């Protein structure tokens, strides 16, 4: 085993330490500076470990990419190519090139389906126009073109703008769900570990129950009973996940901290229970909590997309809703013909969820060294 | 062992009542009066009062809770709004076997696949294959499931034409069939269950044999009779066979799709558990004894890695059940999951909550099964409990 | 401590009853390094010894001196990053290092078996002890034994090591620590191996059980005429049960000879210092000679004799040239340039 040489910056030279010992006054380092310094060093060390894992980097890269995409929306809408509200608003925008069709009498006479249409079909769109005339039909959804790099959806809205707009809601949802989950789980875990006894038993039994409850069916029924919008969804997901597996893990973490000597020391110095929980146990549980935040974000993004896909949520625009719109109008059945409706939205959900998951796994290896490849 | 099962059963019952209470209060928490949603506001007040009384909506909240619980336990889940006058229990009972079939098959398939892949992956560490399979596995785990299901349909059903696009059976094929879909399906389930019982009994019997040759004989006899039974069963029903085949054909893609997203979780977990197990001393001892590599991996390492993986089955079940709901919907497969969704959309509250409650029961029973399985696999638990 | 020399004529270990007998195990110039990120760790450096049939050899040394590495190399059980760079291992005429993986696997347990440190964890918790012993027999007995034969042999072994045969069908967690260790020994004997290697067989046990196990091992060895290699950092254990003793330091064998001789008069400075650092309850009071410093970093071992930085008798030549293992008395070899300087401080027979 190699014994590492101490960092020259950490160790005082002989003269320095002699000088310090001789000085009459102690020179106190401001507390925040010390904390910052230690925090920074810890961050550097953990970053080095994190980077060792290529998957974590990949995840981080994906997240950054999506963050840029989210930023793109307000930027492009303000000063970029998406300034025209009427066209590029993801919810109420509209733009559809007009296609002209020459109307012929019967189906048999159609020589070029791209520019001709028989009279019966024409009646649906252009009522009253006789054969020989021109029927103008707005093309929606439209394939990618110069003004719309990802085309338009069945309601004539720009797909790229939708994609970008939805990224923001995805991040926001993820944040809300993650914070609520971790908040709930940390509090439950800490209380459970700290007080023990019947409270601990009851909370853990509850967590067991919540753990095995499938979230999707519950959220489906809830969305039928209540009208659920984005923030409420985040809070719901947070509460439902927070009571479950995360609480159990954080409780055992809190338990391992509770038995450490410094807790006894704090108690002896007169710390009340609340003080102990808030100032000592929770801060030490937090790093692990942060790890679980990543997994919660993954779950939240997938859940929202699924619920929106079924049309159950009260949200203006999200990736799930994009797919829902296309699906309900039947455009997803024709294979890759309308690929711009099928691929981007689904890929976005998958990639962002995967990105957070990768980061979570890589963080797991940093926090749990036994997972490291050796 | 029996004491163990007994205790867990009681815990499950308690948890179920907790769950039921939760569901009830969720129901009550919805904005507005439940009557307002289903009763025509123009009906006269006395009639309305009568209906309210009949439905028991006039009592205190605890009264209603008690009614709800007692009704549930006696099998009275109410009447469907949408499919009036069918009772909820009637609607659900029709769908449960199908959903059970989907879940069980998908669970088995995904665990067997995930476990065997995971243990092989852990055995040969490092290199390109580890990274690529891990990334691939995680992508399958985090892929947007409805989207993935659509892609599967587009590729295998529309594209390659191997499977039907959706549905439980082909309606045109069955138009003048002498059997109903449920009848045939029941027969299929029956034959599968009997075969499974024969196979499991064989495995158990064989493991009790001390003499290797006898064990081999038992296994040979048992497995062949299990398979033989299946073959004979369907040989004696030539008229039913094509219909059974139709149903089976429709089931393959949904089951495979669900299994694909579920297996990755097991695979990653198995790999992790194996890596921990491989560090144990008894692995070194097995090597020193000259046990062949494959046996070390399977009989020693994997057998121990199985324990945490089985524990995770509980979490995995929640995943599969949720995924099952999506699967049934996207594939238009008429099980309890799709019932849940259609009932919610149609605001058929009794059916929706009934379906939710049943899904809860399913999850609890599965949890119990997993607990028992774990006790069977880990002698330390088994023997401790009986003392 | 009993006099454990054989009754045959004097100490050239090759002779028994006047005939030169080929030792059951010969290790010649074994070199093994571990490959790590920072370089090569020199774990076993030019180790040679021979073990006569029916004797027991104790390998002694501090943690990390290479004694376990020697054993693992012998059995080809080393980790993936271990590289055997040279030497021969000949067990009963078969050169072990030249065998391929499959050949070695077939010879395991039936030619040489090993009892590992900490028997508690050597048992797989999900199978019964009987099943695991049976596994060994099924693998190596030819023809494959029937269930009855396996049972009979296992009961015989359990009786030999002092465990109630009823425990055969129990799971490891139902055994006590000492019983687990005894069962491991039983399993090690199950295929009648030519050589057994016992690595720290008593370290994890309390003193009373330790004594019991040592007595068992000695009994087993004598009854069955087994050849055993004991590995331990505890000199007292080695003193009690071995005929021969090898002292290892930093991957090198520094002293090799009959246990009694070495204890009576240690010739290598390291051995001398170790024995001096143990106060004797019965002997005269004397100044304890401390062993200063720490074992060297095997990534970059010292030049010349590896012990020279800590050796009170070191001279210039010690820093330059590695002393070879030379026989200074029949059957007693030393690797030291200045072994004559080592004082004679013990009265013969003291332990």
Image (tube, rainbow, N blue to C red):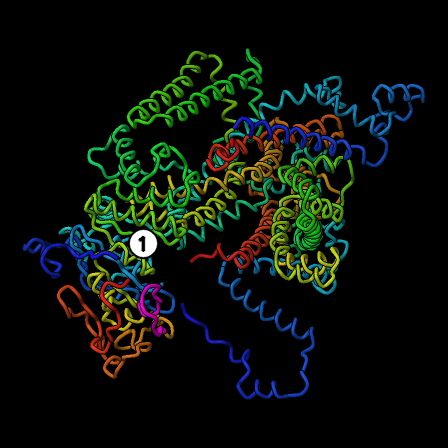
**Residue A204 locus on image (x, y percent):** 65, 42
Inspect this view and state whether residue A165 appears: no
- Element assignment for label 1: strand
Q: Residue at x 10, y 60 (%)?
A: C10
- The image quarter containing residue B143 is top right
Q: Is residue C290 magenta?
A: yes
Name the residue beneath numbered marker 1. Answer: C199
- Magenta highlight: main SS: loop
Looking at the rendering, the stretch of residues picked out in magenta corresponds to C274-291
**Residue A310 locus on image (x, y percent):** 68, 38
Quarter the N terminus of chain C occupies: bottom left
**Residue B227 locus on image (x, y percent):** 39, 21
Quarter the C terminus of chain C occupies: bottom left
Position of A47 with respect to B60 (left or right) is: left
Position of B252 with respect to B53 (left or right) is: left
Vertical relation: C66 (above or below) B181: below
Vertical relation: C164 (above or below) A192: above
Q: Nearer the viewer, residue A129 or A350?
A: A350
Q: Nearer the viewer, residue C154 or A309?
A: C154
């Amino acid at each position: 085993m190699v014994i590492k040489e101490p960092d020259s910056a950490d160790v005082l030279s002989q003269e320095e330490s002699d000088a310090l010992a001789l000085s009459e006054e102690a020179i106190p380092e401001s507390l925040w500076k010390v904390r910052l310094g230690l925090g920074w060093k810890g961050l550097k060390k953990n970053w080095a470990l994190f980077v060792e894992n290529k998957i974590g980097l990949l995840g981080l890269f994906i997240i950054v990419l999506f963050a840029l995409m989210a930023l793109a929306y307000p930027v492009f809408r303000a000063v970029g190519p998406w300034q025209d509200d009427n066209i590029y608003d993801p919810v109420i925008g509209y733009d559809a090139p007009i296609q002209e069709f020459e109307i012929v009498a019967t189906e048999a006479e159609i020589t070029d389906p791209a520019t001709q249409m028989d009279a019966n079909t024409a009646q649906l769109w252009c009522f009253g126009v006789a054969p020989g005339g021109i029927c103008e039909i707005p093309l929606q959804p439209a394939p990618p073109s110069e003004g719309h790099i990802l085309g338009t959806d069945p309601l004539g809205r720009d797909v790229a703008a939708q994609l970008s707009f939805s990224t923001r809601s995805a991040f926001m949802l993820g944040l809300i769900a993650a914070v609520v989950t971790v908040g709930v789980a940390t509090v439950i875990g800490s209380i459970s570990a700290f007080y023990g006894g019947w409270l601990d038993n009851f909370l853990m039994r509850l967590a067991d129950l919540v753990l095995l409850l499938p979230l999707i069916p519950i959220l489906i029924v809830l969305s039928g009973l209540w009208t659920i919008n984005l923030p409420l969804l985040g809070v719901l997901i947070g509460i439902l996940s927070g009571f479950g597996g995360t609480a159990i893990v954080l409780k055992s973490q809190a338990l391992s901290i509770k038995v450490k000597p410094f807790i006894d020391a704090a108690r002896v110095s007169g710390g009340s229970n609340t003080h102990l929980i808030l100032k000592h146990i929770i801060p030490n549980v937090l790093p692990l909590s942060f790890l679980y935040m990543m997994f919660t974000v993954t779950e939240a993004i997938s859940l929202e997309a699924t619920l929106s896909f079924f049309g159950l949520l009260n949200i203006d625009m999200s990736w799930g809703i994009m797919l829902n719109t296309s699906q309900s109008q039947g455009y997803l059945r024709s294979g890759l013909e309308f690929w711009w409706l099928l691929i981007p939205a689904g890929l976005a959900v998958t990639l962002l969820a995967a990105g957070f998951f990768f980061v979570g796994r890589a963080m797991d290896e940093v926090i749990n060294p036994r997972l490291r490849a050796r | 062992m029996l004491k163990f099962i007994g205790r867990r059963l009681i815990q499950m019952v308690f948890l179920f009542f907790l769950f039921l209470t939760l569901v009830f209060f969720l129901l009550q928490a919805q904005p507005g009066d439940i009557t307002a949603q289903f009763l025509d506001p123009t009906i006269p007040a006395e009639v309305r009062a009568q209906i309210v009384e009949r439905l028991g909506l006039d009592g205190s909240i605890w009264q209603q809770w008690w009614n709800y619980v007692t009704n549930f336990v006696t099998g009275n889940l109410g009447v469907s709004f949408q499919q009036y006058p069918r009772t909820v229990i009637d609607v659900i009972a029709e769908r449960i076997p199908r959903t059970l079939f989907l879940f069980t098959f998908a669970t088995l398939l995904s665990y067997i696949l995930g476990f065997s892949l995971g243990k092989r992956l852990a055995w040969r560490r490092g290199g390109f294959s580890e990274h690529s399979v891990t990334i691939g596995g995680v992508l399958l785990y985090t892929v947007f499931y409805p989207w993935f299901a659509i892609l599967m349909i587009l590729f295998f059903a529309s594209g390659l034409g191997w499977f039907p696009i959706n549905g439980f059976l082909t309606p045109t094929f069955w138009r003048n069939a002498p059997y109903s879909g449920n009848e045939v399906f029941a027969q299929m389930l029956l034959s599968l269950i009997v075969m499974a019982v024969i196979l499991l009994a064989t495995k158990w019997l064989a493991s009790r044999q001390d003499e290797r040759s006898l064990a081999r004989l038992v296994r040979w006899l048992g497995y062949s009779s299990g398979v033989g039974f299946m073959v004979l069963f369907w040989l004696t029903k030539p008229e039913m066979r094509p219909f059974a085949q139709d149903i089976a054909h429709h089931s393959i893609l949904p089951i495979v799709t669900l299994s694909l997203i579920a297996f990755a979780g097991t695979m990653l977990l198995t790999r992790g558990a194996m890596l921990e197990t491989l560090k144990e001393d008894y692995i070194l001892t097995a090597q020193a004894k000259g046990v062949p590599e494959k046996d070390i991996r399977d009989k020693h390492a994997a057998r121990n890695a199985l324990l945490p993986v089985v524990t995770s089955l509980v979490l995995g079940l929640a995943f599969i059940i949720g995924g099952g709901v999506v699967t049934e919907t996207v594939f238009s497969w008429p099980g309890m999951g799709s019932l849940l969704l259609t009932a919610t959309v149609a605001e058929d509250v009794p059916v929706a909550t009934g379906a939710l409650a049943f899904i809860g029961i399913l999850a609890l029973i599965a949890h119990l099964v997993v607990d028992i399985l774990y006790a069977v696999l880990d002698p330390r638990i088994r023997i401790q409990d009986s003392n | 401590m009993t006099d454990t020399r054989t009754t045959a004529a004097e100490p050239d270990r090759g002779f028994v009853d006047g005939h030169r007998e080929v030792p059951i195990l010969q290790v010649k110039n074994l070199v093994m390094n571990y490959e790590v990120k920072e370089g090569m760790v020199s774990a076993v450096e030019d180790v040679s010894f021979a073990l006569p049939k029916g004797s027991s050899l104790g390998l002694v040394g501090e943690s990390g001196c290479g004694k376990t590495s020697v054993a693992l190399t012998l059995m080809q059980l080393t980790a993936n990053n271990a590289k055997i760079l040279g030497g021969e291992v000949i067990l009963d005429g078969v050169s072990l290092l030249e065998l391929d993986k499959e050949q070695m696997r077939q010879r395991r347990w039936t030619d040489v078996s090993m009892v590992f440190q900490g028997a508690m964890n050597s048992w797989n918790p999900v199978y019964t002890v009987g099943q695991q012993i049976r596994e060994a027999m099924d693998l190596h007995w030819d023809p494959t034994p029937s269930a009855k034969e396996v049972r009979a042999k296992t009961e015989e072994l359990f009786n030999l090591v002092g465990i109630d045969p009823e425990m055969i069908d129990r799971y490891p967690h139902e055994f006590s620590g000492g019983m687990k260790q005894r069962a491991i020994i039983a399993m090690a004997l199950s295929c009648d191996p030519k050589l057994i290697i016992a690595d720290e067989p008593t370290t994890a046990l309390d003193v009373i059980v330790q004594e019991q196990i040592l007595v068992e091992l000695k009994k087993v060895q004598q009854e069955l005429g087994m050849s055993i290699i004991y590995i331990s950092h505890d000199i007292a254990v080695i003193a009690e049960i071995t005929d021969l003793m090898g002292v290892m330091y930093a991957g090198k064998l520094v002293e090799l000879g009959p246990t009694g001789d070495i204890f009576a008069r240690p010739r290598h400075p390291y051995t001398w210092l170790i024995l001096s650092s143990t106060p004797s309850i019965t002997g005269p009071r004397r100044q304890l000679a401390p062993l200063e410093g720490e074992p060297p970093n095997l990534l970059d071992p010292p030049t010349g004799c590896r012990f020279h930085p800590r050796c009170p008798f070191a001279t210039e030549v010690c820093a330059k040239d590695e002393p070879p293992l030379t026989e200074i008395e029949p059957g007693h070899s030393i690797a030291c340039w200045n072994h004559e300087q080592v004082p004679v401080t013990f009265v013969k027979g003291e332990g």
